[in-house]
Amino acid sequence: MRFQTPLVPGTLIRRYKRFLADVTLADGQEVTAHCANPGSMMGLADPGMRIWLEPNDDPKKKLKFGWRLVEHGNGHFTGVDTAVPNRMLKTALEAREVPGLQVFESLRAEVPYGEKSRIDFLLSCDGAPDIYVEVKSVTLSRQQGLAEFPDSVTARGTKHLMELGNMVAQGHRAVMLYLVQRTDCDRMTLAQDIDPTYAQAWQTATAAGVETLALDCHITPEGVQLGKSIQILAPSEL
């Protein structure tokens, strides 16, 4: 997935009200950018960080920049836009590029199910169980090479795991897909200290038959591409 508009670098002044960020551009101009990330962004929103913004000239948008990447140095990036995973994965699913999810006849997004929930992707094929695919964006890393989810307490995420387990009990397949939007991580785990309830729900869901899959990304200021599968470690394996 290529960014629609070439990104421009800047220096983060501050992130505030979750969805806003003040940034100094290379020419010294200060702008306010939209931050499409409701999480804590732990380790990704420190003042002085080098970040990348996507300009836009859409008259319907109040803010003319969107925050897309954090640059860590040594060629590594983190994607902070939580809308990117679903857009990229829809394309990858349609191209049959996601491991274990290549065989289906129809793909629908945001399908209602469970208790007032919506599944990110529902894959269907005549004569086979439906496949419910929930997607989470992973951006936290506190240990070299290890990505973690979540970066803040997520009651919604816990509910999604329970809903997926219910789908398995009804005879369907269910997949919890973690997209690691970092280029400096080759493993992933659950941040049990941040949200022990979510970590327990993950263990319960996997024991019930919910499949888990973690994929990394190739990220540059030009775009984001789906990478390879990486290992998911239970907190007890660390």
Image (spheres, rainbow, N blue to C red):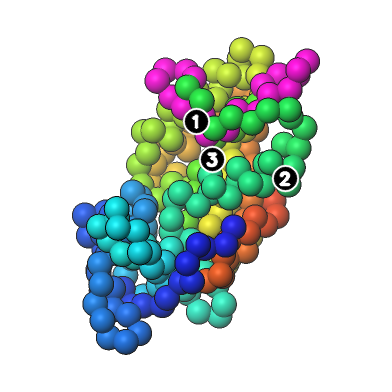
Q: Which mark is residue 95?
A: 2
Query: Is residue 36 rendered to the left or right of residue 30?
Result: right
In this picture, which residue range is highlighted in magenta? 113-130
Residue ID at (43%, 35%):
157
Task: Please state which of the two labelled residues, at mark 3 or mark 2, is closer to the viewer.
Answer: 2
Disc 2 residue type (three-letter): Ala
Q: Which mark is residue 128?
A: none
Q: Is residue 136 above or below residue 11?
A: above
Residue 44, visible in the rendered structure: no
Q: Which residue is mark 3?
A: 135
Splitting the image into 4 quarters, where does residue 236 fall?
top right
Q: Which comes sooner in the sequence, label 2 or label 1? A: 2
- Between the C-alphas of marks 3 and 2, the distance is 17 Å
Query: Is residue 145 rendered to the left or right of residue 11?
Result: right
Residue ID at (74%, 29%):
104
Q: Is residue 3 above or below residue 93?
A: below
Residue lying furthest bottom: 27
Residue 103, visible in the rendered structure: yes
Disc 1 residue type (three-letter): Glu
Q: Is residue 127 located in the magenta-colored stretch of the structure?
A: yes
Q: Position of residue 139 (x, y in %)?
A: 47, 56
Q: Secondary structure at mark 3?
A: strand
Q: Which residue is mark 1?
A: 110
